[in-house]
Every structure is written in structure tokens, then in C-alpha cells.
Amino acid sequence: MTVVVLDLDGVLWRGDEPIPGSSEAVRALRDAGNRVAFLTNNSSLRISDCRAKLAGFGIDADPADVMTSAQAAAELLGGTLAPGARVLACAGLGVVEALEQAKFEVVDRGPADAVVVGFHREFDFDRLDRASRAVRDGARFVATNADPTYPVGGGQAIPGAGSILAAVATASGRTAEVAGKPEAATVAMVRRRLGDSGVMVGDRPSTDGALAYALGWPFALVLSGIGGHDPTEPVPTPPPAFVADDLASLVPQLL
């Protein structure tokens, strides 16, 4: 059995639009005896939200096989902060859920022992002020991920967590620890849950490809998301083991 880890945004869907053939591709991987897991840097969704969205596109997912950068951030903090520590979530419900499951007290203003920044559409000046103020006052500064954009429908992209992170970092004068792909916290989370061997499938060389390299796994690049049209994405080094237009056309190569 091979473990195949799939990114979500740009691999299975773009925004709320499924990428054609994705559910059939997942089914083919499973029918061939592979374990399929899911890993996203989008920290805004709770695990139940991720599973519901997958189910809406015809893909069943066990909770243990769904991993997010929000969980990686909570695990990163769990290495040093005691349960009950106050953590300011400048982020969405996925981060709130992960922090609560790690037994932290989630707050929306300081004082705080840590600040976690992640993607959310409610970000405004007040949230920027509260998060950056807590960081300046000494809170540990963690970001779920540094992706500047996320792919949505119509070949477009929206500002991602990295764009929000840049604002908080600028306002606080501090540099964040990043938890999501391709950073060490996510590497540790993947190894703990899935073991030491597998294939990483993603659309962004700077995160998915770099994570595969850090894990020592083959990287399969699909061109259905950011990697297919964003000129700021680097040419992967080393080159991907597999390249395909989308997951449906990738699966025959993997099998």
C-alpha cells in the first residue's frame, strides 16, 4: 500500500468548484489499494467543514486522514505552551477548533501568550491592531502558513494567509514561526500520522514540492491550481517525479 497525500485547493477544487475528474481519481487510487489522505494549508476550515466539502464532491474522508495547517500550528504551540495558555486567534474557525482541541484558551484580544495568524475573510484594521499589539507585547507569533494566495474559480486567486501575515508582521516588527507546508511542524505531523513513505500531490512547488522534499517523498505536480499559472512560483528543484494537467491525468502515472 502506498500513501498518497493530496492538497485540496487547486488539486481537488478551486474555490467552490470541483476540478473535473477528481472524485473518480481518488476512487481509482483507493481501488488500487492506496491510502489517500488530505493536507491543506488553508486553516480557515474546521475538519468537519473539510470533510463536508469533500463529501459534497463525492469523496469520503476519515477525520484521521484530513490534516490542516491549523492543526500544525496548534501542535507547534503545544510543544512549549501549557494547556490553558491564552492564544489570540487572528484566523478562522479551523484555527479556533485546533487550538481548543489542544486545550488552549482562545481569545480575540490581549494579553495573550501567543498569537496565531491564518486565513480568514473577516480580517480588518481592528483585528490587525489587536494581533500586532499582542505580538509587540511579547506574545509568541505563529502563522498557520505563508501562502500569499489561494486558487479560486475561473483561474483566479484571492489573498491568502501570507498576505494577512505580512500585515501583522509589518505592524508588529516581528517575524512569525510558520507551521504549515513545508515547515517542520507539518513534516512532523505527516510522519506521525502517515509514516515515513508516500507521495505528495500538490499544485504549488514552493509548499507542496518543498514539503515532499523535506519528507523525502516523490512530488507529483498538477497544473490545475496556482502552479499552472502563477509566474512567481519557482521551478521545482529537484524536478517533480510526476507532472500532469490535473489529478485525473496524474493517477494513471501513479498507478
Image (cartoon, grey):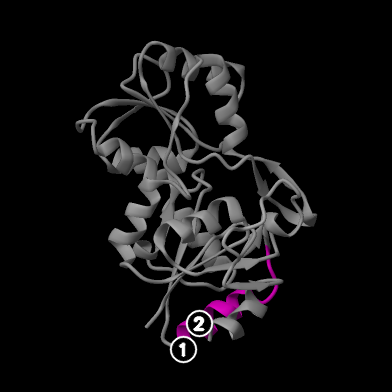
- Residue, disc 2: 29
User: Which one is nearer the viewer's eye here, 249 or 18?
Assistant: 249
The residue at the point 50 percent across, 37 percent down is 92
Q: Residues within 10 Å of mark 2 (few under 14, many from 20)?
A: some
Q: What is the crowding at mark 1: few (fewer than 14 residues within 10 Å), some, or many (at least 20)?
A: few
The residue lying at 38 percent from left, 67 percent from top is 62
Q: Nearer the viewer, residue 103 or 142?
A: 142
Tags 2 and 1 touching, CB below 8 Å: yes
Amino acid type, residue under disc 2 in the picture: Leu
Residue indicated by mark 1: 32
Residue nearest the observer in this picture, 56 or 84: 84
Q: Which residues are magenta?
A: 18-32
Distance (Cα) linking label 2 and label 1: 5 Å
What label sits on residue 118 in the rendered view?
Answer: none
Quarter of the image with the N terminus is bottom left
Judge whether 58 appears above or below 71 on screen: below
Question: Which residue is at a point 51% across and 54% down the rendered structure image?
Answer: 210
Classify mark 1: helix, strand or loop.
loop
Q: Which residue, as the protein is rendered here, is positioned at the far front?
A: 238
Tag 2 secondary structure:
helix
Q: Amino acid at mark 1?
A: Ala
Q: Position of residue 157 (x, y in %)?
A: 72, 47
In the image, is residue 48 above or below residue 172? below
Residue 121 seen by the camera: no
Most common secondary structure along the magenta stretch: helix
Q: Residue at x 71, y 52 (%)?
A: 152
